[in-house]
Image: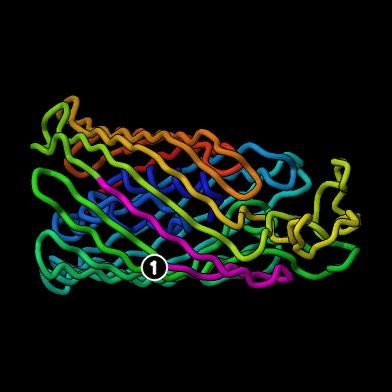
Amino acid sequence: MLRAGTVVSAVLLGTMLLAPPALAQIDKEPSINRPVTPEELERFKRQISEDTRSSIEALGVYHYESGDLNNRLDFFRAGAGLNYKWRPSTRFYVNLVETRYLTQDADYSGWGTNLTFGLASALTDAVRIQAELGATYFSSMGTASVNGLASISYSPTDPLTLYVTASRINVEESLLSATGLRPRTGPFAHELVGQVMETKGVAGATLKLPLGFDVSAEGGGGVRDGSNVGTNPFGLARGIAGYNVISGPSEKPVSFLRVSYQLNYFGFQDDRLGFGGASMLTATGQTIRPEFLGSDGISPHPTANNPGVGGYFSPGYFVSNTLRVDLAGRLIEPLTYRVSAFGGTQNYTDTGTQGAFGFSAIVDYALSDRVSIPASIGFDNLGPFNQLTVMVKLVFKL
C-alpha cells in the first residue's frame, strides 16, 4: 500500500480496467483515502452478472515515485490469474504476483511473491459479497505476511446501497514499509524493521437521486503495524456528490460523462514517516552502505519534532477537496477508453494549502471476442510525493 498519491493511482487505474477480480490483489485494496464513487461500486456489481466466461489474465506494472533514497520506492510487477465462473452469479479467482522493489541504490532492493484466492458472488438481487485470502513471501527478507478482504453490500431499494468492508494489506510506500530491512548495527541490529501492514474497516452508503445526481459517504478506521514500528491507529472519512451528465449506450464515442466533488480526510495517531535505526541515509543526507545500516544515529521514536520509524506517510490530518471528471466511450468497434482527472487542494499536518491533481487513462483493445489488451497510465501528486503507474494486461476469455 501506498502513500496518499499511490492510493489514488491504484484506484483510478484499477477501477478503469473494468476487469473481473482475478488480479485484484495486484493493485492491492486501496488505502485510507480511496476516492470511491457510486459508479465504481455499481460497476463491480455488473461484473459479477455480466461476465459470462471464465478467463485467464496476465499483467505487467511499472510504478515510479519521487523522493529520496529512503522514501522513493519504484517497482516492476508481473502476474497471472485465473478467473473461474462457477455459477451465473458466483466467481472464484486465484492470482500469483511477483514484485521487484527498487530504490535509487542497487544495493537496496527486494522481492515479494503474492498468492491470493478469492470469490465474488451475488447471493440475491440485493446482497453481494466478496472475500479473499492471500500471503506474500518476501524472499529478500525470508519473511511472509498475510493479506485478506471481506466485503458485503446490501441494496434494500434500487437507489440505496449500504456496504461494509474489512481488509488487511501490505503498505508499499518505501522499501522499509514494504519488505522491511535488517540493520547490521544500531538499536535494531539483526532484527527485522518495517514490513508494515494496514488493517482497517469501513462502512458507507451511496444514494442515487433524481435527474442523474447521487451522494455517498464513508467512514472507518484501523491500525498500521509491523516489526519494531509500533501500532499506529488512524481514522478516515469521505463524502462525494456527483452528477451523470451523460449515461448512454456503451457503443457511442462518448457514452459516459460524470462530474463529482470529493472530500477526503484521514489522520494518524503518530507520524511514522521516519527511518531512524534503519535509515539508508545519515542525518546529513549521506548514503549508508548496507553493512553499516543502523548506524544513522537518528531516533526511531515518534516525537513532536521527529517522525518515528515506519517509512510511510502518516500525518496527524490530511484533507483534500477535489473536483473529478470521468469520461468513457467507444472510439471504434474494438477500442474502448476511459479517462479520469481530478484537481483541487490538499492540506496536511505542518503544511499550507497545496494544489492536488492527477489523471489516468485506459484503452482496451479487443483482438477478438475472446482476447483483449487493456493498457493504462496514471499520475498524481497527492501527499508529499509524485507517483506514476503504467499497466498492461492480456485477457483470454475461456
Q: Nearer the viewer, residue 278 or 374?
A: 278
Q: Quadrant of the C terminus?
A: bottom left
Q: Nearer the viewer, residue 286 or 77?
A: 286
Q: What is the x, y in percent for residue 17?
A: 31, 44
Is the residue 239 above or below the residue 211 in the image?
below
Residue 256 seen anywhere in this rendered image of the structure: yes
Dominant SS type (magenta): strand
* Residue at horizontal 19 percent and vertical 32 percent from the top: 329
* Residue at horizontal 51 percent and vertical 33 percent from the top: 355
Residue span colored magenta: 220-241
Is the residue 195 above or below the residue 262 in the image?
below
Is the residue 53 above or below the residue 220 in the image?
above
Q: Which quadrant of the view contains residue 186?
A: bottom right
Q: What is the x, y in percent for residue 145?
A: 58, 70
Q: Which quadrant of the view contains residue 167?
A: bottom left
* Residue at horizontal 44 percent and vertical 47 percent from the top: 10
Residue 132 seen anywhere in this rendered image of the structure: no
* Residue at horizontal 42 percent and vertical 67 percent from the top: 220
Q: Nearer the viewer, residue 352 or 132?
A: 352
Q: Indicate the amino acid at tag 1.
A: Val
Residue at the extreme front of the image, as rendered? 352
Q: What is the x, y in percent for residue 118?
A: 35, 69
Q: Secondary structure at mark 1?
A: strand
Residue at image mark 1:
202
Q: Is residue 209 magenta?
A: no
Is the residue 46 above or below the residue 355 in the image?
below
Colour mode of the rendering? rainbow
Q: What is the x, y in percent for residue 99?
A: 56, 52
